[in-house]
Image (cartoon, rainbow, N blue to C red):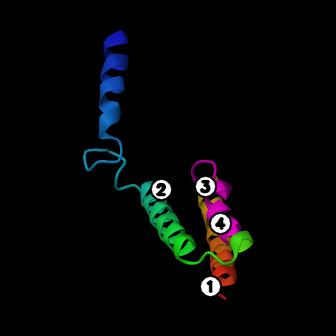
Amino acid sequence: MLPVLKWLAKARQIRGSWLDPFHFSPEKAVDRRLLADYEADLDLIASVSNKPAAALQLANWPAEVRGFGPIRSQAAAKASQARETARAALVA
């Protein structure tokens, strides 16, 4: 069992790369989309600095995405709604 665990420890480097066996799973696609959305939000926050409360609300929406499987999917949907609300408040 020890050699298998050593191999798994070395295989950690392939996470997130195209060699990752779970790279094309729907859950990973959602994770990549959420990360891209968050990076775009941080760029928006950096460009708009006159509403700190709205910026804080926009920066905190990813904290709501937790869990695995269907629980994570539901949390991601709710967080996306919170993101849109916070974005609208920041831009307005």
Q: Position of residue 13 (x, y in %)?
A: 31, 35
Label 4 is placed on what type of residue?
Ala
Q: Is residue 75 left or right of residue 33?
A: right
Pointer 4 or 2: first along the chain: 2
CB atoms at circles 2 and 3 under 8 Å apart? yes
Of residue 45 and residue 60, the one placed in the foreground of this image is 45
Of tags 4 and 3, the one toward the viewer is 4
Label 2 is placed on what type of residue?
Glu
What residue appears at the point 35 percent right and 25 percent down from the top-left corner? 8
Residue on which disc 1 sits: 91
Residue closest to the far bottom: 92
Q: Look at the numbered disc 2 and give the secondary structure of its residue.
A: helix
The numbered dot on residue 27 is: 2
Q: Position of residue 21 (x, y in %)?
A: 32, 44
Of residue 4 and residue 84, the one placed in the foreground of this image is 84
Query: How far apart are the two marked residues, 1 and 2, measured between alpha carbons?
Result: 30 Å
Q: Look at the numbered disc 3 and give the secondary structure of its residue.
A: helix
Could one spot residue 45 in this view of the protein? yes
CB atoms at circles 4 and 2 under 8 Å apart? no
The numbered dot on residue 72 is: 3
Label 3 is placed on what type of residue?
Arg
CB atoms at circles 4 and 3 under 8 Å apart? no
Of residue 46 and residue 33, the one placed in the foreground of this image is 46
